[in-house]
Amino acid sequence: MAVLEAHDVTKDFREGREVVSVLKGVSLAVERGEVVGLEGPSGSGKTTLLFILGGLLTPSSGRVIIEGEEVDPSRTDQLPDVRKRSIGFAFQHFNLFPALTAAENVEYALNIKGVRGPAARREAERLLEVVDMADRRRLRSRHLSGGQKQRVAIARALAGQAAIILADEPTASIDSQLGSQILDLFVRLARDENRAVLIVSHDTKVRAIADRNIQIRDGCLLG
């Protein structure tokens, strides 16, 4: 059963007097335990779609359903709750706090989701073990390599038992070998922790590890 669905989603942006249609009736579904790759050139609408699916943008029309609950764009109180409960983001540029340690960055995400104190510290250490970063947990993020930062970012995305992991170009800022390790980690998270994983990427290696690959061009899904 799908935990993430989009039905006929459109997104328009106004540039002066002109309306630009970025998404044109996009529909897709992602299930638990599945890794889905979303690939397209710059300007194709893939990141806009990812942000709509994650509740960071609202669609101009269409429906988004997360864990069986339809997201209502008119309810400004709903989106933060949906993101906290169901969505974990792994951003291209990591978005870590440089002055915080690896563990503290993950703890912060847990605090936002309502987990605090000793429970947050224990869970942060467990999540860092999942991404093979337990031995770096006390290092400040500014002292971590690109691959290590990405692993911490993924651990943070897992905070709060999010059913859905959305990754935006997760291998773009690291070398090829580390990129392969990160993609293998996403597969492990989907299989071992039953998460739904959607990866937006230009990286052709995503095609090899994903259960399905979706192409997007000019705001439309192909195939």
Image (spheres, rainbow, N blue to C red):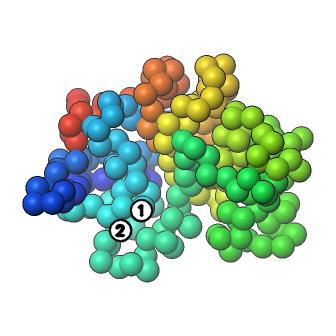
Say whether residue 25 is visible: no
Callout 1 touching callout 2 (CB < 8 Å): yes
Task: Report helix, strand or loop for mark 2.
Answer: loop
Query: Which residue is at a point 30% across and 53% down the rendered structure image?
Result: 6
Judging depth in this view, the residue of 211 and 18 nearest the camera is 18
Residue 3, given in percent of the width and then of the height, sits at: 44, 54
Is 138 situated above or below 220? below
Q: CA distance from mark 1 to mark 2?
A: 8 Å
Residue matched to label 2: 71
Number of marks in picture: 2
Judging depth in this view, the residue of 37 and 196 nearest the camera is 37
The quadrant of the image that shows the C terminus is top left
Query: Which residue is at a point 53% across and 24% down the rendered structure image?
Result: 209
Q: Amino acid at mark 1?
A: Gly
Task: Report helix, strand or loop for mark 1.
Answer: loop
Query: Which residue is at a point 49% across and 42% down the rendered structure image?
Result: 168
Judging depth in this view, the residue of 148 and 2 nearest the camera is 148
Q: Amino acid at mark 2?
A: Val
Say whether residue 110 is visible: yes
Residue 211, given in percent of the width and then of the height, sits at: 46, 29
Side (left or right) of 114 relative to 89: right
Residue 24, given in percent of the width and then of the height, sits at: 17, 47
Q: Report which quarter residue 161 is drawn in.
A: bottom right
Disc 1 versus disc 2: nearer the observer: 1
Q: Earlier in the sequence, mark 1 or mark 2?
A: 1
Label 1 CA crowd tier, 10 Å (few <14, some 14–19, many 20+): many
Query: Which residue is at a point 63% across and 23% down the rendered structure image?
Result: 175
Residue matched to label 1: 55
Residue 217, given in percent of the width and then of the height, sits at: 24, 33
